[in-house]
Amino acid sequence: MTDQRELLELLLEDARQSTADLARQTGHTEAEVEEAIADLEAAGVVHGYQAVVDWANADEEHVEAHVELNVELDRETKYDDIAGRIANHPEVETLRLVSGDYDFSAVVVGDSMRDVSGFVADRIAPIPEVTQTVTHFVMETYKDRGVDFGDDRDDDRLSVSP
C-alpha cells in the first residue's frame, strides 16, 4: 500500500474506523490496510490512538497548562538528555523542542492549578539545566487536534431576526 498519507489522514480524522471502512475509502483490501497500519506502528510513525476529550463537559477536574522552558546546555548535556528527564513525568502530556524565545514547550496536566504549579515548581524548575519556566494555564479549549468543540457550546447572545 503506497497511500501512506491518505491512510494517516483517515486515522487522524477517526482512528476508530474499521479496517473495512479504511479499505473502502482507500481502495485497498482489508489485509493491505492492516499490513500498512502494522508497518506504520512498527516504524514509529503511529505511536498510539487517543480520544479527543472536551474536559469542560466531563464530571472530572482537569487542568492543563502550557509551560515554556529555557535551558542552558553544557558540553555533556544535550537537548535530548533534558527532554528525556522532563518527558518521563506522567504529568507532562506533550513536550517539544521549539524555536523562538524559549527552548521547550510542554503541556502539563493535573487535577488542579495547585497540582500543576506544584509540579512545575518542585519537579521541573529544579532541573539544573532549566533556567526559566513560564506557565500559561488553559482557560477554555475551543478546538483540540482538529476537533472543534464549538458545536456543543451554548450561545447566550441574543438572536436578531428581521
Image (cartoon, helix red, strand yellow):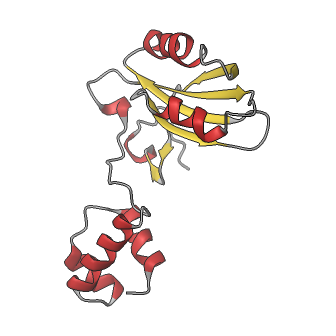
For the N terminus, give its image quadrant: bottom left
**Can residue 157 be seen by looking at this rendering?**
no
Residue 109 visible, this orientation: yes
Residue appearing at x 29%, y 30% in the figure:
58
- Judge from the rendering whether residue 134 lies leftward or rightward of residue 53; answer left or right: right
Q: Residue at x 58, y 36 (%)?
A: 81
Q: Position of residue 105 (x, y in %)?
A: 62, 35
Above or below, 37 relative to 137:
below
Q: Residue at x 71, y 35 (%)?
A: 103
Determine the residue located farthest toward the right in the rendered image: 101
- Front one among 108 and 25: 108
On the image, the x and y values in percent for residue 10 come to 38, 70
Residue 11 sits in which quadrant? bottom left
Q: Judge left or right: residue 89 versus residue 104.
A: left
> Residue at 49% of width from left, 28% of height from top?
108
Q: Is residue 114 left or right of residue 81?
A: left
Give the quadrant of residue 54.
top left
Q: Nearer the viewer, residue 46 or 127?
A: 127
Q: Position of residue 20 (x, y in %)?
A: 20, 79
Is residue 32 depicted above or below 13 in this figure? Answer: below
Residue 76 image offset from top left, x and y in percent: 69, 34
Is residue 69 placed above or below 52 in the rendered structure?
above
